[in-house]
Image (cartoon, rainbow, N blue to C red):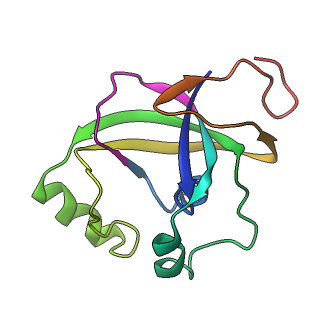
Amino acid sequence: MKVLTIKQPWASLIMLGLKKYEFRSWKTDYRGELLIHAGKGIDKDGMERLKKYIPENMPTEKILGKVKLVDCIETSPEFYEKIQKENKDIYEKTVFNQDYAWQMEVIEVYDNPIKVKGKLRLWNYEGGVNGKEE
């Protein structure tokens, strides 16, 4: 199954349903189920800025659950204006290249996140998820 590694707190915010868009400098044609992996890295500025949204337990180096990647939208000033109305804290413009917004819908948060090292870009995970074999 396809996996995307994301720094904390962003990975947890996606799984909580608070962040519907993950930003990348590259586009993907992939649509469908996608595992969300919380990487080893932590965005310290994001942690400080978003502390009111962050859960106590924020695992790293684990697959947190599954989402459905439904779209990949080329961003524009109008797009940012729209999503900042949804949540200005989470969708604050950053210095990172945010050319594409990957739109996700949360399908399943795993009770027992899966310990695994992350990788860059989209990658494949061949193991079982949440006690089930793929």
Q: State yes or no: residue 14 in magenta.
A: no
1 lies above or below 20: above
Point out residue 134 in the picture as x, y percentages from the top left corner.
75, 17
Point out residue 54 in the picture as x, y percentages from the top left corner.
61, 73
Q: Residue at x 56, y 63 (%)?
A: 9
Q: Residue at x 79, y 39 (%)?
A: 114
Q: Kindly give the residue lying farthest to the right in the view shown.
A: 131
Q: Which picture quadrant has residue 34? A: top right
38 lies above or below 17: above
Q: Which picture quadrant has residue 129? A: top right
Q: Residue at x 39, y 50 (%)?
A: 21
Q: Residue at x 27, y 69 (%)?
A: 84
Q: Which picture quadrant has residue 128? A: top right
Point out residue 122 in the picture as x, y percentages from the top left corner.
49, 28
Front residue of 131 and 99: 99
For the record, the magenta segment spans 23-34
20 lies above or below 28: below
37 lies above or below 77: above
Q: Kindly give the residue lying farthest to the left in the view shown.
A: 77
18 to the left or right of 15: left
Q: Which quarter of the rendered picture does the N terminus lie within?
A: top right
Q: State yes or no: residue 31 in magenta.
A: yes
Point out residue 133 in the picture as x, y percentages from the top left corner.
82, 18
Front residue of 102 and 40: 40
